[in-house]
Image (tube, rainbow, N blue to C red):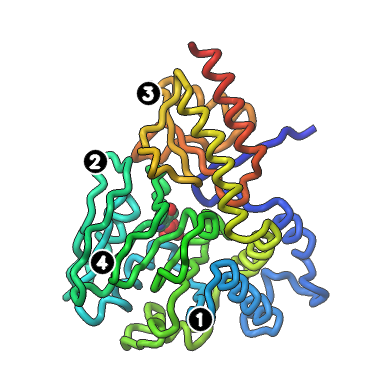
């Protein structure tokens, strides 16, 4: 007998069970080719079909038309901290950054390493990043873009409304990609490391206005959106397996009813945990209610020893990877797109039991 196990890891993270089963079923012989997906060429028609379907599904799920293109890159969300300013900060050589936590700050820090570029921090969420401060009105004709981190994976905050700005908007959606609704055509460019919500680690999705991608800055090829877009992300060997899994996960997301339905399901899961936390005598979450993330929920008992016991006992009960990020400690539950509702119920029930036992 195997026990039901739920994985609340922040990334790499849970993938949809039916997708893993399909991967397993066709691993040795991909669609009658007598080759494994792990062996096929990125120049083969088999891969071209996967690539085209994945791209089409991304645009359809985001409700974006032909004015947008999708790139399937490597280097994680982190390489985008460099590629975005290199490719986009070319007119004013100045970019605005909303600092809402660790990843937002990392994006700013990397932009500041680029010569002849001024990267301004235009908001500050305070020392413990429990809010999403409004972005001030930015003067027209000064900034190439405004960068936001749509969901702050470590602190558990999220933008529920995109900032009103006339400056082209760039978003890091690594931890809420296709799991939270936005008017996606408000973004000039958005990107997401795949391992939180979409695929195994090793793939980064970039979705951007074609017109932006067409502006070739003559950058080194692997850092050059235009060069990568011209070659359909295959300037070099792309991560074939990751793109294949992404294609399957995208199909699964379509079956769930698309972004609106997934976002509603994510909200339902998160609400279970937040409702419990709001009434708990043991656990707390200090994020401002209006800024609460639907996908990452940090919480604590306030006592490191008790937190450690909670994490250990939860693991025993099959609730895995609930330790908070090393920067903030405590616990964190990541309830990404592929986490079933039952996973949120199991966590809520376990928290209630632990609370009772530790009055
Ligand atoms: C995890 C994460 C990153 C870093 O992603 P890598 O793919 O590991 O480079 C960047 N931004 C956010 C919001 C993240 O959650």
Q: CA distance from mark 3 to mark 2?
A: 18 Å
- Which of pointers 1 and 3 lies earlier in the amino acid sequence? 1
Labelled disc at residue 302: 3
In the displayed structure image, the side of residue 199 where residue 224 appears, left or right: left
What residue appears at the point 80 percent right and 32 percent down from the top-left corner? 1
Q: Is residue 330 above or below residue 257?
A: above
- Which of pointers 4 and 2 lies earlier in the amino acid sequence? 4
* Residue at the top extreme, as displayed: 359
In the displayed structure image, the side of residue 143 where residue 224 appears, left or right: right
> Does the beta carbon of the residue at mark 3 sit less than 8 Å from ligand 1?
no
Q: CA distance from mark 4 to mark 3?
A: 36 Å
Q: Position of residue 295 (x, y in %)?
A: 50, 46
Residue position for label 1: 236
Instruction: Label 2: state its secondary structure.
Output: loop
Residue position for label 4: 111
In the displayed structure image, the side of residue 82 where residue 60 appears, left or right: right
Closer to the camera: disc 1 or disc 4? 4
């Amino acid at each position: 007998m195997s026990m039901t196990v739920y994985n609340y890891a922040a990334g790499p993270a849970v993938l949809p069970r039916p997708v893993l089963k399909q991967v397993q079923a066709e691993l040795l012989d991909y669609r009658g080719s007598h080759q494994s997906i792990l062996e096929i060429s990125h120049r083969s028609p088999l891969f071209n079909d996967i690539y085209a379907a994945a791209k089409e599904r991304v645009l359809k799920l985001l409700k974006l038309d032909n004015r947008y293109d999708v790139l399937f890159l490597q280097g994680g969300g982190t390489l985008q901290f460099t590629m975005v300013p290199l490719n986009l900060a070319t007119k004013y050589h100045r970019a605005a950054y909303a600092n809402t936590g660790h990843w937002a700050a990392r994006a700013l820090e990397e932009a500041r390493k680029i010569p002849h570029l001024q990267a301004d921090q235009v908001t500050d969420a305070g020392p413990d990043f429990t809010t999403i401060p409004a972005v001030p009105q930015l003067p027209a004709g000064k900034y190439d873009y405004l960068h936001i981190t749509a969901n702050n994976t470590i602190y558990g905050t999220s933008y529920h409304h995109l900032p009103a700005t006339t400056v082209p908007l760039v978003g890091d959606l690594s931890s809420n990609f296709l799991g939270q609704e936005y008017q996606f055509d408000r973004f000039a460019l958005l990107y997401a490391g795949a391992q939180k919500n979409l695929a195994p680690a090793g793939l980064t999705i970039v979705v951007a206005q074609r017109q932006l991608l067409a502006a070739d800055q003559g950058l080194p090829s692997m850092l050059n959106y235009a060069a990568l877009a011209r070659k359909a992300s295959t300037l070099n060997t792309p991560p074939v397996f990751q793109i294949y899994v992404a294609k399957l996960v995208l199909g699964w997301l379509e079956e769930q009813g698309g972004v609106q339905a997934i976002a509603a399901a994510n909200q339902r899961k998160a609400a279970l945990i937040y409702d419990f936390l709001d009434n708990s005598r043991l656990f707390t979450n200090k994020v401002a209610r209006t800024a609460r993330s639907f996908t990452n929920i940090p919480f604590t008992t306030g006592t490191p020893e008790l937190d450690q016991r909670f994490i250990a006992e939860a693991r025993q009960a099959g609730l895995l990877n609930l330790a908070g990020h090393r920067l903030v400690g405590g616990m964190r539950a990541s309830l990404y797109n592929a986490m079933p509702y039952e996973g949120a119920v199991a966590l809520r029930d376990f928290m209630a039991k632990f609370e009772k036992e530790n009055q």
